[in-house]
Image (cartoon, grey):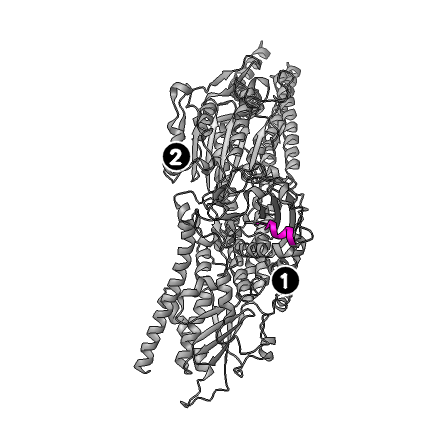
Amino acid sequence: MKPTSILRYITASVCIATTLAISVTTNKDDVEGFFAKSKSQSGHTNNWAVLVCTSRFWFNYRHIANTLSMYRTVKRLGIPDSNIIMMLADDVACNSRNIFPATVYNNRGRHLDLYGENVEVDYRGYEVTVENFIRLLTGRVAKETPRSKRLMTDDQSNILIFMTGHGGEEFLKFQDAEEISAYDLGDAFQQMYEKKRYNEILFMIDTCQANTMYTQIHSPNILATGSSKLNESSYSHHDDPDIGVAVIDRFTYYILEVLEKVNMQSKATLKDLFDTYDYNLLQSTPGVRDDLFDRPLDEVLLTDFFGNVQNVELTESKEVNNSLTEADPALVDSDPMFIEDPQAETTSSLKQSVPWSQEQSHTFEIGNPDQSQTWRFVAFAVLSVAMGGALFAGSSLV
Amino acid sequence: MPTDRDSMAANDNTRRMVILSVWAVVLLGLPLWWKTTRVYRAELPYDSIDQWNQWKACQPKFPIRVNLHLSETEQQQSGRNPELSDVTQGVTRRFQELNTANGVKESLLAIEFIAGKPWTGSINKDITEHTSTVPGTYDFYISPSNVTHASIRSQRQGFIQVQSWNTDHIIDTIVETSSAVFGSEERTIRQLLDTNEDTQGVRKVHDQLKTVKYAPGYQLTFSLFSGDASNGVREWKMQEVIHAYLAPFIKTMSTVSKFTIESQIQHYASLAFTPQMDYSSQEHYLTPDALPNFINAAEWSLASTVSSLPSLNFLTYVPKPSESPLVIKTGPGASKSSTNSFLIPRWGGVAILNRDIDRTKRSEEHPEVITVQDLEPVMRVFLTQLRDLMGVTDLSTTTQSSSSFPIVFHKSLNEAPTTWELDNLLRRRSAENLVDSLATISSLARLVRKTPNMVVLDHIQKDVTEALRDIGRSCEHLSRQEYVEALAASRDGLVKSETAFFDPTMVSMLYFPDEHKYAIYMPLFVPISVPLLMSLLREVKRLKEKKKQAQMDKDSQGHDDHDIQHDKQE
């Protein structure tokens, strides 16, 4: 091989290697340029809120008010109803004991009716169960579940999860019927992480011994905060003598006090919020768990979780490119017949489209859970009867 | 005496039989109980899942065939005409060298260069009509010219013109063109398929930030939001515009995904804030900072509950007269956005449409109708945004500045993806689906392994097995360069793996520690087991006593006999 051609080879390959390198880096730069602003931010593109009130009955008025206040706040800050899942017993507004029918207030002053005109409760009354909550988080809902009852998040979703109710060490009671444990919660979050169902989660809980609820979370990018530590109760803030019950809890009250000053453009951070926590006001020790969370709290905007601030990209006209395309110097006049025929093209590619169906039928009934459940009952009953009989016979003999 | 003894023995026997039968029930019942109360767990194919996770079962390959056609008309003054086989071999060798230089063992996009038919050197009907309809098979037509230049036609054709008509230069040009066309794609796919454990969870391919996740179908919602009624907007010709401009795009993309389209009009849709005023140009303007809050989510109803397909929104906003014209710019005096529109990643696009009130009053019969002509620029913007959201890579933007000679990418006139872009998308989405469905299956397997209390039903096993089979099918199709079938198979795999993962029965029993089990079974088993054990112990004791008695009887037997004899003697 001639030395010149070797040289040429080398220069060409160097040129191409750099070509490749440059093409990739420029591409990266473009994208990073667009998201450079968001680099300090979380990199999410959508926001969701899951607001859960786990209590029912009139005397738990304040829990419903807590949840509705939070609902109002996130809605005001831009999270659309379609992205808010609210689980609420919803039995106080129209309770016969409510002397202000169809209203819920969170303040003695009664300036603001939280129940308003436009409240969308997604899981209502007896639908607020541990199972539904876990199903909602993990996405394992029945096929016929409507969109409004699904948490349709992806790997770029920031989720605010707010829970309030009565709880204890590592559990939270659901409507006096069942309870969710801190382990269940940790597992549910882990499964969400496995399926990339969130970018970041802010978990807030206002209940007695609330901080124990986030001890079993072990998935990354979750920030948790609670109202009181182990063996501490969380207290209500004040009551309304006319309504006759407490109308809001302390923790929620003071959080709302901060959030009320926040608007969509606000640059307030979570650190600002956490710094306002005060034992003297709350009469309990609020906790923050940030060991799973990557970003420093003073860079996390409140609107990253409570709002719906999206990164946008200005669309610029591609006229420049088009004109370049048309001004193909060498070929433009070579043959007038050579006109792009998009129609022909689409048909040609259409021919290869393969029909397919999304529907799959599951006609399997073998391992029916109900069936196995009945089997268990039957076996257990038979055994118990047999043993009871044996016991009776044995004891009479002995 | 003897009758007493007999009855006692009979009693003993009955009692023993009773105790024995009770114990028999218990001993037979225990395994039965154990078996029937065990959770049903269908066995998942863990081994093949593990194999797939390291791409051991099948390494995805994306073969590409490029037919090289050399112009034969040009008789070279310098004598020897370049041999096509030399060129083909040279290009192939160069690509191998490039790969080794980049530290890549095997190229994922296995580009194969094939010597094609020579051509006349002028683009004529023969060539334009005999285009490749097979995704992944392309034709490069090479001809001499006075300037080096490549032009990538939309129908899987590339025309390369080289300045000096010799083998080396031709090889250089082809290699550079191919790198420009396929280089970034190779990198993207490699990044996608990287199954390195450390990076898997956090890895995000940059382009994916904008692009929506793959779904078999999408719902496109076109909304017209009118600031108030005084701007006189009552109707828009969206349907016609969709037919005219969007249809080709949808048609082309139908190989990849299906689309459902709906449109709506909402009046009195006010902004959540007041735009700023630029008095010098008599324009109201929005700064880019304000755009994230543009969507008035609380009052504008954008969510659709009709289908559960992922939805994309395209929003045309007609400002009210007191706020028009409304433009996007950084400040007063700054130049305004040429398209007056912006894209929200993974959500959709927004375009602000200013209506020239004087013009509409003056010339048109129906000023309340937004015509097709008015909507055309808006639709062009939406198409551009839709391309971005769908992940159609604009090849011209990724390679523009990097080559040593101009490479021109032709676009289809209607913004529909060109065949090159479509093939690129087919390959990338297949790879994405393979990775996604594998990730889903392996996290399902992890979950099942970790939760011994979880019921795993047969249809889960069936779904997982079928998903794995679909993945395998897709991988095979890929290696045979059947991209459309590969995507279809990978889509099936994705759907099945997600069905299995999100199956409603896969919610494991809530946290159920062992103490709880003891607490449940103790009240039953303790009262039963005490008499059971006691009776057994007592029986054993009695048996022992009896044996002792028998022994003693035996010992004293002689004595007794003696006594009897003694009696007799008396």
Q: Residues within 10 Å of mark 1 (few under 14, many from 20)?
A: some
Can you tell which quarter of the image residue B83 is in? bottom left
Residue at the outermost left position: A3
Instruction: Indicate the secondary structure of the residue bearing disc 1.
Output: loop
Viewer-nearest residue: A243 or B168: A243
Can you tell which quarter of the image residue A297 is in? top left
Q: Which residue is mark 1?
A: A353
Q: Which residue is mark 2?
A: A290
Q: In the image, residue B48 lies at what x, y percent?
A: 51, 54
Question: Which stretch did the figure color magenta?
Answer: B354-362
What is the magenta segment's predominant secondary structure?
A: helix
Q: Is residue A22 above or below residue A87?
A: below
Q: Is residue B355 magenta?
A: yes
Q: In the image, residue B201 lies at what x, y percent?
A: 44, 47
Q: Is residue A259 above or below residue B280?
A: above
Residue at horizontal 32%, vertical 78%? Answer: A6
| Distance in Å between CA atoms under marks 1 and 2 | 49 Å
Viewer-nearest residue: A163 or B405: B405
Chain letter of mark 1 equals: A
